[in-house]
Every structure is written in structure tokens, then in C-alpha cells.
Image (cartoon, grey):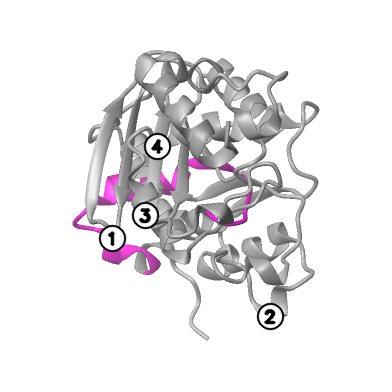
């Protein structure tokens, strides 16, 4: 078995980036919370990009219903902790990786340690996790760490980037604690994808159960998310290219082969968003 050698393992990326930039990626630290639908794909994509250090968090285990979309979901992984399975896969790509694991997930007691030394935060938490997501985004902003999220909606990716000096996650989404869970879900979904490009390919709206916190998903969307996330992380770490910071949002829908960029100052408080929320409540909640 050949010995691992970093420069050889990742040399095929050279040309798109320089040797000096590859070294920058090798020294970078990325924090990823959630290793399920998109988080696992994020970790493996960034490991193949040559990122050298990670902090990863997930308290869940793999189950059979994860099989249609999650990078670590295999028969042999069923019942095993996601954080262990994905770290093994990442280390099998680059055995020199430094990975700090948070097998009990993120909470107020460990969020600062999770973000310590991170150059960027990558959101991979489950769609319906709001309180912890807001906590991590808030602490990332406090620590001057940019935070990225890429949502797999239908057969599309919806991307948002939060700059520490820009609009906050809380202000953009307005997920007030006293709101009902289905209202939070509507606000999160519309805030992620104001253009709603994915809606046209949904053939059975009743499959979305916001009250029961479940919905349909596809593997293509998760891989699209990983591609966009990997590119945006690269651009930030190498300080080149354009990042469209919130309140800009970008969505690419592979089913319709369409891309749309939207600008919503004030996030969900914007008049267009408020109208969209009203329509979504009528369609999905029957209100």
C-alpha cells in the first residue's frame, strides 16, 4: 500500500488554484455542525479539496430512511454514529486530517469550543433545528466567523452566506421563539429560497408535513449543495471571487436548469417576503 503524500493526493486541483493556495487550504479549519443530508457531503467534498482541519458535530445515528440522500448512509453504517462514520470516510481520504469530534452535538456549553480556531462555519444541521442553528450563527458572528448554509430543496440548492458585519441570521429569518414550529419552518424555507424555483417540481404538496417536521428529499440536491458549499468555502479561504452575502440569496434548480439571485433587505420582513409567507400559509397550512 502506497504511503499517503498530501501534494500528490491533491495535485489534480492545481491549475484551478496555485500551490500556495493549496497550502492555505491545508492550513484552514472548517467547523461543520450536522453530518446528515448535506453535512456529510460537505465534509467529504472539503476533505477532497485538501482542507486540513475540521471540527464536526452530530449526535445522531444512521437509519434506513437516510439511505436516499446521506453520504454516510450504507447498510454497514446503520445504527452507527454519523460522526464516527463520516470521520472514518474523511480520514480514509486524507489520513493526516485533524478532526475534533462533538458526538453529543452542539449546545450553549460547547459552541465556543466548537468554533474555536474556525476560519468558516458550514451549516449542516437538520432543516427543522432552529434554536441551535440560531445559537451557532450568532456565536459565529460574535467571533467574526463567516457562516454559510446550503439547503437541498427539491432538486435544487439554495445558498445563503452571512458575513459577521452584515445582516444577522436572526434578523434575516425572524424565527422568534414564541412562533409555532410550522410557522418557523415556513419562514426558514422562504428565507432560504425567496425565488421558490423548486416549487414547480413538487408533484405532491401533501408530502410536506411541517407540523410533523418531515418532507421529501433527493440525493441530487445534497450533492448540489456540497458543490456550491465547497466552492464558496474555497473563495472565502483564498479571498478571491465574489460572495453574495445576505440579504442576497442564490438558488439553482437542476430540474428546471434555472438560477436566480434575490435581494431581500430585512429578510422575511421585506414586503415581498411577507406576501410570500401569506401565500405559503394558504398552500401548505390551509390558513
For marks 2 and 4, the one nearer the N-term is: 2
Mark 3 sits on what residue? 227
* Marks 2 and 3 close (CB-CB < 8 Å): no
Image quadrant in which you'd find residue 24 = top left
The correct choice, above or below, for 206 with respect to 278 in the image is: below
The correct choice, above or below, for 206 with respect to 24 in the image is: below
For marks 2 and 3, the one nearer the N-term is: 2
For marks 4 and 1, the one nearer the N-term is: 1
Mark 4 sits on what residue? 193
**Residue 266: % across, % down:** 41, 13
Residue at 50% x, 76% y is: 3
What is the number of the mark on residue 13? 1
First to last magenta residue range: 9-38
Mark 2 sits on what residue? 75
Find the distance from the CA under tag 1 to the CA under tag 2.
32 Å
* Marks 4 and 1 close (CB-CB < 8 Å): no
For marks 1 and 3, the one nearer the N-term is: 1
* Marks 1 and 3 close (CB-CB < 8 Å): no
**Depth check: 156 or 72 in front?**
156
Amino acid at each position: 500500500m502506497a504511503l499517503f503524500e498530501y501534494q500528490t493526493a491533491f495535485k489534480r486541483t492545481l491549475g484551478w488554484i496555485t500551490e500556495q493556495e493549496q497550502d492555505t487550504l491545508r492550513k484552514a479549519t472548517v467547523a461543520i455542525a450536522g453530518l446528515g443530508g448535506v453535512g456529510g457531503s460537505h465534509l467529504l467534498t472539503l476533505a477532497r479539496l485538501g482542507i486540513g482541519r475540521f471540527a464536526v458535530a452530530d449526535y445522531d445515528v444512521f437509519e434506513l430512511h437516510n439511505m436516499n440522500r446521506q453520504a454516510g448512509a450504507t447498510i454497514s453504517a446503520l445504527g452507527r454514529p454519523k460522526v464516527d462514520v463520516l470521520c472514518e470516510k474523511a480520514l480514509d481520504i486524507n489520513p493526516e486530517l485533524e478532526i475534533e469530534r462533538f458526538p453529543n452535538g452542539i449546545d450553549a456549553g460547547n459552541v465556543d469550543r466548537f468554533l474555536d480556531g474556525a476560519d468558516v462555519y458550514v451549516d449542516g444541521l437538520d432543516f427543522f433545528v432552529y434554536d441551535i442553528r440560531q445559537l451557532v450563527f450568532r456565536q459565529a458572528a460574535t467571533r467574526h466567523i463567516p457562516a454559510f448554509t446550503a439547503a437541498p430543496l427539491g432538486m435544487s440548492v439554495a445558498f445563503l452566506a452571512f458575513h459577521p458585519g452584515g445582516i444577522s441570521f436572526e434578523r434575516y429569518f425572524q424565527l422568534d421563539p414564541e412562533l409555532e414550529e410550522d410557522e418557523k419552518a415556513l419562514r426558514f424555507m422562504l428565507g432560504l429560497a425567496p425565488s421558490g424555483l423548486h416549487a414547480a417540481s413538487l408533484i405532491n404538496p401533501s408530502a410536506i408535513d411541517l407540523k410533523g417536521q418531515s418532507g421529501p428529499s433527493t440525493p441530487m440536491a445534497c450533492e448540489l449543495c456540497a458543490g456550491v458549499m465547497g466552492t464558496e468555502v474555497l473563495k472565502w479561504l483564498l479571498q478571491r471571487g465574489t460572495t453574495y452575502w445576505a440579504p442576497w440569496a442564490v438558488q439553482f434548480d437542476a430540474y428546471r436548469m434555472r438560477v436566480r439571485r434575490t435581494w431581500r433587505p430585512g429578510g422575511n420582513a421585506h414586503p415581498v417576503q411577507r406576501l410570500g409567507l401569506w401565500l405559503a400559509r394558504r398552500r401548505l397550512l390551509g390558513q
